[in-house]
Image: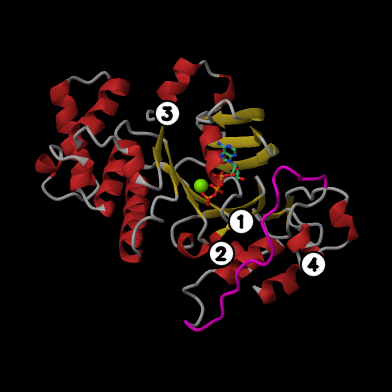
Amino acid sequence: MAPLLEVRNLRTDFRTGAGVVRAVDGLSYTVERGETIAIVGESGSGKSVGALSVMRLIPNPPGRITGGEVLFAGRDLMKLPEEAMREVRGGDIGMVFQEPMTSLNPVLTIGRQITETIEQHRGADRVAADRRAVELLRLVGMADPARRLKQYPHQLSGGMRQRVMIAIALACEPKLIIADEPTTALDVTIQAQILALMQNLTRRLDVALIIITHNLGVVARYAQRVNVMYAGRIVESGTAEQIYHNPRHPYTVALLRSVPRLDRPRQARLDPVEGQPPDLTRLDEGCAFRSRCRFAVASCARSAPPLDPTEEKGHLSACFRNHELGVAMASVA
Ligand SMILES: Nc1ncnc2c1ncn2[C@@H]1O[C@H](COP(=O)(O)OP(=O)(O)OP(=O)(O)O)[C@@H](O)[C@H]1O
Ligand SMILES: [Mg+2]
């Protein structure tokens, strides 16, 4: 069977005063039915623009999707009429964003925001939608759901607002949820609770999940596959185990050294990724990471390395030196 989601060579530009920003530059990855994947990369690597492009939510101008395909259950979303795309958003694909205060409407009750989605996508009547809203709030672990439905977003804590966002994302029984930094605004214990909740619910309901994060440290326990993103494309893809124990791209190695890890002694030193993220208006034909890469050689300037298989099944790396340097890379991570 075809994957649930297949993103192929997606490209998105922004026209700005400073030039054309190539925010997403040949993004490709797949998500199987019911699978949880992570997309990890530092700030500005194009994670959010990539997700918004999949949903066709890029503001134009200044943005424009300039190429690629997004196959969802075999249909290319890039070719759908806008009306059909509105059905996909919130219907087949649910979304959870970083800051629920900006995505929830401050002047509508929690209940109305959930029932609105249900009525819009399911044509359910008010009573049925209300009943479903109570059920959804219970599902995401909110105590006293009937009372909560009558409240406004500002009356809820950050963690509760995020639970409401998850309820809305689940409202129409989507096949996929895209969660963009769903927990970065929350404190550490609440982060873990929300991630565990999403993992538990998506497994139980057989929903696929894309977790987008800049923190490679948190995703390990939740994602089956980890995609590492740099300058608008995936530079390494593998199981969580492969990425953590046998990284094959110098950028992944640097990222791993920059985050606290559960499998390391507490005092292990953390190194920020050295150097500056690339200027996305000035990408050339070479590898975008080479100016920060301790393994770079002359050929890295000539062309961008393709995402090639390593010797491990299902493990891909976009580095010319991945085979030659495999062990050396893993040992410095
Ligand atoms: N509306 C816009 N106009 C111009 N450039 C934009 C716009 N939106 C995003 N960009 C640029 O696209 C690039 C990718 O941004 P994106 O928001 O996808 O990064 P990110 O990986 O999600 O980072 P973060 O971890 O900070 O959320 C950045 O260089 C950003 O400045
Ligand atoms: Mg982002």
Q: Which residues are magenta?
A: 266-285
Quadrant placement of the C terminus: bottom right
- Residue for badge 4: 295
Which of the two labelled residues, at mark 2 and mark 4, occupies the earlier sequence position?
Answer: 2
**Could you tell me which secondary element the residue under label 4 belongs to?**
loop
Q: How many marks?
A: 4
> What amino acid is labelled 3 in the image?
Arg
> CA separation, marks 1 and 4?
21 Å
Mark 3: which secondary structure? loop
Comparing marks 1 and 4, which lies closer to the viewer?
A: 4
Where, quadrant-wise, is the N terminus in this rendering?
top right
Q: Pick the residue in front: 202 or 23.
A: 23
Front-lying residue, 37 or 211: 211
Along the viewing direction, whichever of 41 and 265 lies nearer the viewer: 41
Q: Are marks 1 and 2 in contact (CB under 8 Å)?
A: yes
* The residue carrying mark 1 has its beta carbon less than 8 Å from ligand 1: no
Among the two numbered marks 1 and 4 on one chain, the one whose residue lies closer to the N terminus: 1
> What's the distance in space between the residues labelled 4 and 3, CA to CA?
42 Å
